[in-house]
Image (cartoon, rainbow, N blue to C red):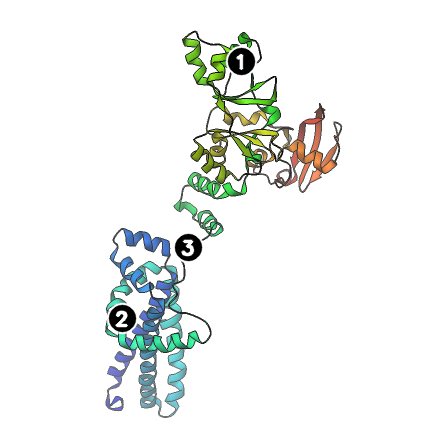
Amino acid sequence: MLESTSLSLLFIILFILLLLSAFFSSSETALMSLNRYRLRHLENEGHAGAIRSSQLLERPDRLIGLILLGNNFVNILAASIATVIGIKLYGENGIVIATFALTLIVLLFAEVMPKTLAALHPERVAFPASFILKPLLFLLYPLVWFTNLITNYLLSLFGVSAVESSTSAINREELRIALIEAGGLIPKRHKEMLVSILDLEKVTVDDVMTPRNEIEGLDINAALPDIIKQLSHCSHTRLPIYEDNMDNLIGILHVRKTLHLLAQDNFTKESLSNIVKESYFVPEGTPLNVQLIQFQRQRRRTGIVVDEYGDMLGLITLEDIFREIVGEFTSDLIDEDKDIHPQEDGSYLINGSATIREINRHNQWSLPTDGPKTINGLILELLESIPEAGVSLRIENYIIEVIQTADNTIRTVRIWNEKEQDV
């Protein structure tokens, strides 16, 4: 029959078969390259192409079976027609010529080009293709089912189950990478906040708490005028209340509640003690994501961080955790530069009590954070002694000079970042 068909008609049929081959090749690549999360979003919005594509991808074995069935059929038929054309044009030599010519044409125009286009623009190809593949799957379902039956049986011999749908869930690190690589699709500020939320489990209360020696507390045994004066000048909303020293902690006072006592002229130590709330203790090393949930469950905003012996290490607040997520968010806290002072020579004068995390965040540095929490602690751990002023040391590409020491601690240091100096 093909021998009696005119060359012009054979060329038309061959051209149509090559278009169909390109269609099946591009459809396979496009559907497999779709972003499943964007697909789900479009599906929820009622996008018809997304709905059909999602339905096809529910059983990828059937989809691939359909596409390969169609692709192989048109390619084999195209090869047969090309052979007839070659024989008509060049005789027996036409078989070899047709084989090489068709291989090159199929490779370029039915494989590489359509698949490249589909990989670059999967939605533009997959959604229109789904309108053809969906009814085609219905028409050829018995043949596709029989093909998959044999294929799935052969796979089962190797312990592979084709009907097990692969999970589309991603873990925390994959989500982090997706956020980082989102580019301009997500505003930079929002991206930083989302990444900070994912990183909460890597940060503990020890990293963000106010150390014990920096906690402002109220001695209940102090003279009443001194207590009133301290409360009137207090910059915090909550204060730890203790007797004589911080080891005898009584609880946490909400400073605003003292205003009612003062307004009612009922401010006494007894009335003050009555509004003190029992302390809420937090074990050291608690991840921030866990502590955030605990604050919510306990309906607390302030916790006392204690070690395994119950000794007080510091104070953690809900605001400290929020600061890890959104950064500095009040006018007072924005002035964190009180600990970090840039110098004209490119160095930084930094208070020894400044936390390494804040230094890294402020200067975009990478000082080690897996050990001591403050720059004072980091230097003492490395030197294993309290240095005198003028002592210098190097940590990776950071040169640190001790400027001032007092009371067995390092008060001030100067730090150079060699990479910034080179720039």
Q: Residues within 10 Å of mark 1 (few under 14, many from 20)?
A: few
Q: Residues within 10 Å of mark 3 (few under 14, many from 20)?
A: few
Q: Is residue 219 above or below residue 13?
A: above
For the residues carrying marks 1 and 2, which lies nearer the camera in this image?
Answer: 1
Circle 2 residue:
137
Residue 96 appears in the picture as rendered: yes
Please state the horizontal and vertical placement of residue 243, each as a whole percent of the image: 58, 18
Circle 3 residue:
169
Q: Residue at x 27, y 58 (%)?
A: 51
Q: Is residue 18 above or below residue 311?
A: below
Query: What's the mark number on residue 230?
Result: 1
Q: Earlier in the sequence, mark 1 or mark 2?
A: 2
Residue type beneath disc 1: Gln
Q: Earlier in the sequence, mark 3 or mark 2?
A: 2
Please state the horizontal and vertical placement of residue 400, each as a whole percent of the image: 69, 34
Helix, strand or loop status at disc 1: helix
Mark pair 1, 2: CA separation: 79 Å
Q: Residues within 10 Å of mark 2 (few under 14, many from 20)?
A: some
For the residues carrying marks 3 and 2, which lies nearer the camera in this image?
Answer: 3
